[in-house]
Amino acid sequence: MHPDVAEVMQELDAHRARFIAFCRALTDEELERQVPQSEWLVRDFIAHLATIDRPVAAMFSTIQEGRQQGGGGEADRDRWDVDRFNQGKVEERRQRTIAEILTEAAAERVRLRKVLGALQEETLSRTLHFGGDARRSAAEIELRSYLRGWCKHDPMHAVDMLRALPERRTPLIEQWIDDPVIASYQAQMNR
């Protein structure tokens, strides 16, 4: 495994372990709270993180294979709407238990780790097309750089969840989320 990928996977795994522990500690009432500055409930962020690994793995595979994301051409690359995808997956999981959602997340993470483990220097140096979302513009980003920020996805959304759970902000949680990349993401997404 490429050392840069190994480093990313180590951080990714550590964040996922902390995120799962955080989620399992939440009460049913806390899971159903509306998150300020969001249309989602606390539980919806868990569902999002359980389902986003599949399209992310597909994107990494596409880059690994040297194909254009979306099948080629600017119009194709912009066709997939991440916000619509996320909303649909969240709504589909509103009646599932958190245990079911975390089981799904674990299975998706196994698939994603296989894709990540195959990435080598040539692929890490390629650029990916980030299509943007409701709050961020599209951009071309080196895959290696993208991975270093993307691996913080779990704590990024833990911060979102904490807006509805201020009593859960402990020194241990604060230590986990104290990261300039996470702070920058929150500044972009929650202006």
Image (tube, rainbow, N blue to C red):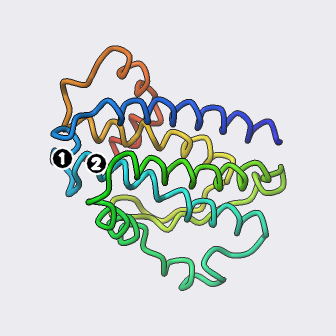
Q: Secondary structure at mark 1?
A: loop
At x 39%, y 59%, the residue is: 136
| Mark nearer the N terminus (1 vs 2) | 1
Horizontal arrangement in the rendering, residue 57 relative to residue 79 (left or right)? right
Horizontal arrangement in the rendering, residue 47 relative to residue 165 (left or right)? right
Point out the image quarter for the N terminus.
Answer: top right
At x 43%, y 67%, the residue is: 82
Tell me the quarter of the picture where residue 3 sits.
Answer: top right
Residue sitting nearer the eye, 39 or 54: 54
Tell me the quarter of the picture where residue 54 sits.
Answer: bottom right
Query: Around disc 1, counting alpha carbons within 10 Å, would you say few (fewer than 14), some (14 to 19), or many (20 or more)?
Result: some
Which residue type carries mark 1?
A: Glu
Note whether 12 is above or below 128 in the view shown: above
Residue sitting nearer the eye, 171 or 31: 31
Disc marking residue 185: none
Q: Which residue is mark 2?
A: 43
Q: From the top left corner, tell me how far across and down residue 31 is, in percent.
A: 23, 43
Instruction: For the residues labelled 1 and 2, say whether their Cβ atoms are less than 8 Å apart.
Output: yes
Q: Which residue is mark 1?
A: 32
- Measured Cα–Cα span from mark 1 to mark 2: 6 Å
Which residue type carries mark 2?
A: Arg
Query: Around disc 2, counting alpha carbons within 10 Å, would you say few (fewer than 14), some (14 to 19), or many (20 or more)?
Result: many
Q: From the top left corner, tell me how far across and down residue 182 is, in percent.
A: 43, 36
Residue sitting nearer the eye, 41 or 73: 41
Horizontal arrangement in the rendering, residue 116 relative to residue 95 (left or right)? right
Q: From the top left corner, tell me how far across and down residue 67 is, in percent.
A: 74, 75
